[in-house]
Image (cartoon, rainbow, N blue to C red):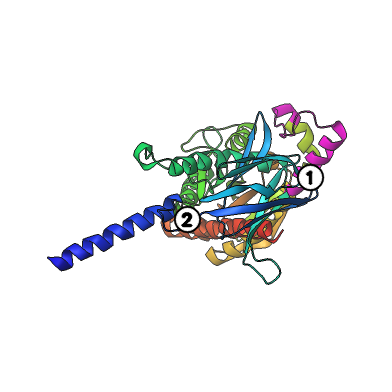
Amino acid sequence: MLTEQVGEMVTGLIRILALCVAFGLSCGLVHAAEVSEILVSGDSEYTRIVFAADEPLEEETFLMSDGQGRRLDIHLPGASVSLDAHTPPPDGAVNSYEIRQGEIILSLNTPMMVSRTIPLSPTTVDHRHRLLIDLVRVAPIRFDRAALNDDKARQQFAAAQAPMKSRKFAPMGARPDQYVVVIDPGHGGRDPGASASTGQREKAIVLEASKAIKSVLERSGRYQVHLTRTDDTYIEHEDRVSMARNWGADLFISVHADAAGNASVSGATVYTLSARGERRVDGTAKSNGWHLPIEDGTSQEVSVILEDLIKRETKSNSSVFAELLIPELEKAGPIVRNSHRQENFFVLLAPDVPAALLEIGFLTNRSDVARLSSETGRRKTAEAVGRAIDAYFDRRDLLYAAN
């Protein structure tokens, strides 16, 4: 009996300590850190924030974009800023900042995201603990999308900091670090696409392949995945692109199956936008209302530069994804020669969504038809696409951190 009581006491203490850690409570066991200095320096490309304190600091950062402009909200759980802290005027991308209880809100003059955080231990020169937060400039659309995700995360964090007796636990919903991937099954409805000699039609084959890709991606919980169609319905090309933009897509993949006059031709092909297609982007975006989210009041000259940077980044990321996808597809089945090609396809014309069109095989080739009609073949293709998507977003995360 005594052993059981001791065990229950230990278990209870562990639970209390776990709650303390999870919700940033001191529980009377940890001395609250006191921030003695806040320094902000840099320029419009790279800005560094430095906090100095007598104890190690933890941080939670959230981007904010609303009627008050673009801001960075930094929470320092369990810490407070000393009344006589050294807080010189900020420099770089920060106009000003407001110190609240355990929270610092920085007003940004240009879109910036956190590229890395670096905790530094005391040294013989500086006996304080320091926390470095590096910011890097990003496209306005990337900031605003991230801020939209951070809004939910910020609310969840605030709820976790509320007193236990008043806290209400609600379903977490989508993770704030999820990427949005849109899979577009080609054709549909009145447009059957290519046909195989055995009777299979492209619109049905690519729908099943797209569903398989969605299933693979959703296993990890890393992605929000949308299909532009889930049944035998035809959707106009401009609507497919508009749907992707409205969903805030980080990546758009249009799935098709090819046909050739030579029945021996087989394998997958990946297309990104050609130079001719690039010349169509501005006109198509204007006619369809695909406006880039440049901040109101920005001069025409600066707006043109920012729009050009967004389009360049979109083109570059599309090509990066295509190059990552090809070797993965080769593991799942044959690929054509010169497997990364450029074309003037309408679904690739979004100015701000990296996009690729994937031809998963030839319906005029018996081996490809058998592979794409089987559950095993579809699964291999879907897993290949999933690995490439993982590699693409892993690479993007590493680039942000490296900056």
The residue closer to the viewer here, 218 or 166, is 166
**Measured from the top left, where is residue 14 in percent x and y?**
32, 60
Can residue 361 be seen here? no
Q: Nearer the viewer, mark 1 or mark 2?
A: 1
Quarter that holds the N terminus? bottom left
The residue closer to the viewer here, 339 or 70, is 70
**Measured from the top left, where is residue 108 in percent x and y?**
72, 40
Q: Is residue 378 left or right of residue 338?
A: left
Q: Amino acid at mark 1?
A: Leu
Q: CA distance from mark 1 to mark 2?
A: 37 Å
Q: Identify the residue position indicated by label 2 in the image.
A: 378
The residue closer to the viewer here, 391 or 173, is 173
Residue 277: name its quadrant.
top right
Compared to 341, does 327 lie above or below? below
Instruction: In the rendered structure, find residue 309 and report the number of the disc placed on it.
Output: 1
Task: Identify the element where label 2 is drawn.
Answer: helix
Boundaries of the magenta span? 286-313
Q: Amino acid at mark 2?
A: Arg
Extreme residue toward the front, this view: 84
Residue 309: name its quadrant.
top right
